[in-house]
Image: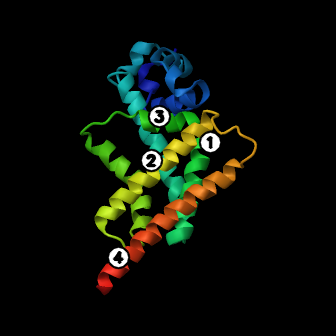
Amino acid sequence: METKKGLTITTIIETATKLVEEKGYNNFSLRELAGRLNVKAASLYYHISGVDDITKAVGELASERMNQAFESATKGKERDAAVSALAHAYRKYVKENPELYLAIMGVPLSDDKDLSEQRMRTISPIYEIMGQYRISKEEIMHCQRIFRSTLHGFTMLEASGFFQAQDTNVDESFDFLIQNQVLLLHSLEDCAEKNDEV
């Protein structure tokens, strides 16, 4: 058995992340993690206080990876093109990393400063894109909430196999989702311009 001296928190989190990807977020256990690391379960407690520490850290790592995907997809793009690119990046991440996405959603709400900052980094690309439209801060808040909620709902339903009807292409439905978000943003811009003219 490897001693606790050969164990680091980075190794623990990276191994836990791989385990979640392989076995599933809801099937994760400290006992299996210890076995994968070839240590006794008790050795883990020199680095963590419990399973919540692990699930939180895995969620944070998964969130950071998702944020990187957003930034890469939207780099050099603005407004409508950026909205579309981010939406497709979101869907791709959920398809390719379903268990890590569940880990992101499973991170408990708390007053943890680091966790709050991580969440802000994840949604900051959306705020930045919405800020490119001539709409108010309040409208940006509403729009990003609608956008995230719609993307989450669509991708989770898709992952659960609810979009099996053969008469309508799922990709076309997703494009329709994006088009409606863009239409909402342009509609709000038009209203703002009309109000400015009054």
Counting from the top left corner in percent of width and height, residue 2 is at 50, 19
Classify 10 Å Cα crowding around label 3: few (below 14), some (14-19), many (20 and above): many
Dot 2 or dot 1: first in sequence order is 1
Closer to viewer: mark 3 or mark 1 = 1
Disc 1 and disc 4: Cα gap in Å?
Answer: 37 Å
Disc 2 and disc 4: Cα gap in Å?
Answer: 24 Å
Disc 3 and disc 1: Cα gap in Å?
Answer: 14 Å
Dot 2 or dot 3: first in sequence order is 3
* Dot 1 amino acid type: Lys
Closer to viewer: mark 2 or mark 1 = 2
Q: Residue at x 42, y 41 (%)?
A: 60
Counting from the top left corner in percent of width and height, residue 101 is at 51, 38
Closer to viewer: mark 1 or mark 4 = 4
Circle 3 sits in a helix, a strand or a loop, which is it?
helix
Q: Residue at x 28, y 85 (%)?
A: 198
* Dot 2 amino acid type: Ser
| Residue 124 horizontal side relative to residue 28, left or right | left
